[in-house]
C-alpha cells in the first residue's frame, strides 16, 4: 500500500498571490471524442507524490476497467511533493489541458485557487453524477470544504481530525532499548536523539525536510504562514506566530538539535524524506496520525514503525481540506471527470488498483478485503491519503477487522479548532501577501528546521515580514475573523 501513508498529511502550504487568468474551454459531453467517434475519452489527472516507475503500467489496467465501466481512460501525471504547487500554478495559469487535480490546504491551496477560478464549481455535477460520493462521504467534509458557500472539490473520506505524533523506527528503538514513554514535547526527545547520534552514524536522529514546522498550540489562518490564533483563544486575537514564546522556544530547541547533529544538514532544502524512509536511515520524525497508522507505515516501509502523540486531536480547516480532488475549470470533460471521481470513491476494485497497483503484480489479496505487498510494490508506492476514499482500501494483514469503524469513531470524537469554517479572503491585501510570501520563502524553512540561529535570524525575519506588509495583512485577517465570529 501507499508510500506516504506515512505522511497522511504532510504539513506544507504555499500561498499563491498571483492571479490566474483562466478561460473555460468548450465542454464535451458523454463519451464522444472531439471527432465524434464512440471511443472512451481520456481524462488527464495531476496528482502529488514522488513519481512512480509503474504509474503508466498501472494506469493502463485502470483505463481498461474505467473504459468498460464509464467510457473513460486515465492519464496520471505525478509531480513530486516539493514541486507540485509551483508547477500546478504555472500550468493552470497557462491553460494546460487537465481534467482532475489534487488540491489541499497545504499544496496548491484549495481555497485560494477556487476563488481564482482554477476549479469548476461542482454542486450540480455532484447532484447528477456524484450521488455515490454524497451518500458515502461524511457530510462534515463537503460542508467544511465549501468556499463562499460552494463546493469546488471532493475531500478524501479519511480521518477528519488531525493529531500530531512522533514516529519512530522501531528497529532502532529496540536496538538501543529506548522507550517512547514520557515523550511528548520536542524537548523530551533529546536523550533518545543523542543515543542515536552517538551510535548510528549516517542515520538522521530527527528526520526533517524543508516542509517541517514544529508543533505549537495555535490554529493557523494559512498553513505555513505566520498568522494564527491560540487553540484556547477566547478573544480570537490574530497574532504573528514568530513573536510567540512557544514558537521562539521551539525554534531555539530545533537550532540546538541542528548544532548537535541530530538533524540533517541539508534539511532546509530537502524536498522529502522518501530516501531516508526507503533505506531506514532515520530514527524519528513528525507526522499526522489516524487509527492504526503504525500498521500502515510499517506495511509501506517494510519495517516496523511506532508512534506516540505530541498534540491533542482537533478538526482544523486544513484537516478537512487536507486531501481533495478538483475538476479543472478548463476540463474538456467535466461530466466524465465527475463520473470517474464518483467511481473512484465508491468502487473498491478501482480504488485499490489506483492505490496499490495490479493484483498479482504489486499486491496479492489474502482475504476478501485484506492484502499484502509483493516485491514489485516498490515500483508503485502511492500516497494513499491523496487518492480518494481511504475507507475503501484493503486492510493490511495486521489491521483489525473493525478498522473503518474505528475511523468513524475517531472522526466523531474530534474537537473543533477555533477557526474551523473560517476561510480568509486575501483579495484586499494581495500585494502585501505576495511580499510576505516572498519573505517567507527566504526565512521560513531555515528557521523551522533549526538551520539558523533564531536569536539572530528571527528578529531579522520579523523585521522583513513587517516591512513587507505583515501588519496590514494581519489587520485584514483580524477584521474578517471578527466578522465571521459575530455571525456564529
Image (cartoon, rainbow, N blue to C red):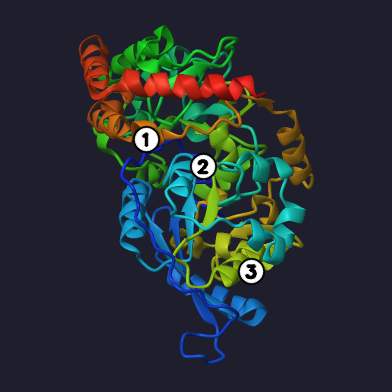
| Residue that appears at 51% across and 42% down | 6
Q: Quadrant of the N terminus?
A: bottom right
Residue 297 figure quarter: top right
Q: Of marks 1 and 2, which one's residue comes earlier in the chain?
A: 2
Answer above or below: position of 169 versus 189.
below
In the rendered structure, find residue 211 and report the number of the disc placed on it: 1
| Residue that appears at 55% across and 50% down | 324
Report if the CB atoms under discs 2 and 3 are less than 8 Å apart.
no
SS at circle 3: helix
**Residue 348 x, y percent position in the rendering:** 69, 63
Q: Of marks 1 and 3, which one's residue comes earlier in the chain?
A: 1
In the rendered structure, find residue 339 and report the number of the disc placed on it: 3
Query: Mark 2 highlights which residue?
Result: 6
Residue 411 in the figure: left or right of residue 249: right
Residue 89 in the figure: left or right of residue 60: left
Disc 2 crowd rating (10 Å Cα; few below 14, some 14-19, many 20+) is many
Question: Is residue 321 shown to the viewer in this render?
Answer: yes
**Residue 191 x, y percent position in the rendering:** 42, 14
**Residue 130 x, y percent position in the rendering:** 68, 62
Amino acid at each position: 500500500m501507499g508510500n506516504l501513508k506515512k505522511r497522511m498529511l504532510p504539513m506544507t502550504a504555499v500561498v499563491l498571490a498571483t492571479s490566474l487568468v483562466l478561460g473555460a474551454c468548450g465542454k464535451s459531453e458523454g463519451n464522444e471524442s472531439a471527432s465524434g467517434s464512440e471511443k472512451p475519452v481520456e481524462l488527464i489527472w495531476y496528482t502529488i507524490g514522488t513519481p512512480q516507475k509503474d504509474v503508466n503500467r498501472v494506469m493502463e489496467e485502470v483505463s481498461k476497467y474505467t473504459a468498460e465501466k464509464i467510457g473513460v481512460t486515465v492519464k496520471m501525471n505525478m509531480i513530486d511533493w516539493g514541486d507540485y504547487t509551483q508547477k500546478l500554478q504555472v500550468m493552470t495559469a497557462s491553460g494546460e489541458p487537465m481534467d482532475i487535480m489534487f488540491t489541499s490546504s497545504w499544496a496548491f491551496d484549495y481555497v485560494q485557487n477556487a476563488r481564482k477560478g482554477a476549479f469548476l464549481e461542482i454542486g450540480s455535477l455532484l447532484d447528477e453524477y456524484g450521488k455515490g460520493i454524497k451518500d458515502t462521504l461524511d457530510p462534515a467534509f463537503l460542508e467544511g470544504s465549501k468556499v463562499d458557500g460552494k463546493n469546488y472539490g471532493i475531500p478524501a473520506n479519511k480521518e477528519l481530525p488531525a493529531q500530531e505524533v512522533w514516529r519512530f523506527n522501531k528497529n532502532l528503538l529496540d536496538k538501543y532499548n529506548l522507550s517512547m514513554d514520557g515523550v511528548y514535547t520536542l524537548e523530551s526527545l533529546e536523550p533518545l536523539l543523542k543515543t542515536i547520534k552517538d551510535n548510528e552514524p549516517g542515520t538522521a536522529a530527527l528526520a526533517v525536510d524543508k516542509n517541517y514546522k514544529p508543533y505549537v498550540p495555535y490554529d493557523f489562518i494559512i498553513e505555513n504562514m505566520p498568522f494564527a490564533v491560540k487553540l484556547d483563544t477566547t478573544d480570537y486575537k490574530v497574532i504573528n506566530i514568530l513573536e510567540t514564546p512557544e514558537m521562539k522556544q521551539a525554534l531555539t530547541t530545533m537550532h540546538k538539535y541542528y548544532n548537535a547533529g541530530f538533524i540533517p544538514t541539508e534539511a532546509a532544502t530537502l524536498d522529502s524524506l522518501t530516501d531516508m524512509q526507503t533505506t531506514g536511515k532515520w530514527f524519528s520524525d513528525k507526522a499526522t496520525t489516524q487509527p492504526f497508522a503504525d500498521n500502515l507505515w510499517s506495511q509501506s516501509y517494510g519495517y516496523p514503525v511506532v508512534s506516540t502523540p505530541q498534540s491533542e486531536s482537533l478538526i482544523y480547516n486544513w484537516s478537512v481540506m487536507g486531501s481533495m480532488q478538483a475538476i479543472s475549470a478548463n476540463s474538456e470533460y467535466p461530466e466524465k471527470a465527475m463520473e470517474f471521481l464518483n467511481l473512484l470513491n465508491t468502487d473498491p476494485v478501482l480504488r485499490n488498483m489506483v492505490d496499490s497497483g495490479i493484483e498479482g503484480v504489486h499486491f496479492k489479496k489474502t482475504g476478501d478485503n485484506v492484502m499484502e505487498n509483493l516485491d514489485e510494490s516498490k515500483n508503485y508506492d502511492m500516497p494513499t491519503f491523496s487518492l480518494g476514499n481511504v475507507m475503501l482500501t484493503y486492510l493490511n494483514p495486521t489491521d483489525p477487522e473493525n478498522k473503518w469503524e474505528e475511523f468513524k469513531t475517531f472522526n466523531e470524537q474530534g474537537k473543533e479548532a477555533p477557526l474551523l469554517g473560517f476561510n480568509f479572503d486575501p483579495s484586499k491585501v494581495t500585494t502585501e501577501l505576495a511580499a510576505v510570501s516572498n519573505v517567507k520563502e527566504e526565512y521560513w524553512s531555515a528557521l523551522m528546521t533549526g538551520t539558523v540561529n533564531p536569536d539572530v535570524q528571527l528578529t531579522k525575519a520579523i523585521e522583513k515580514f513587517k516591512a513587507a506588509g505583515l501588519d496590514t495583512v494581519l489587520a485584514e485577517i483580524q477584521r474578517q475573523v471578527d466578522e465571521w465570529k459575530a455571525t456564529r
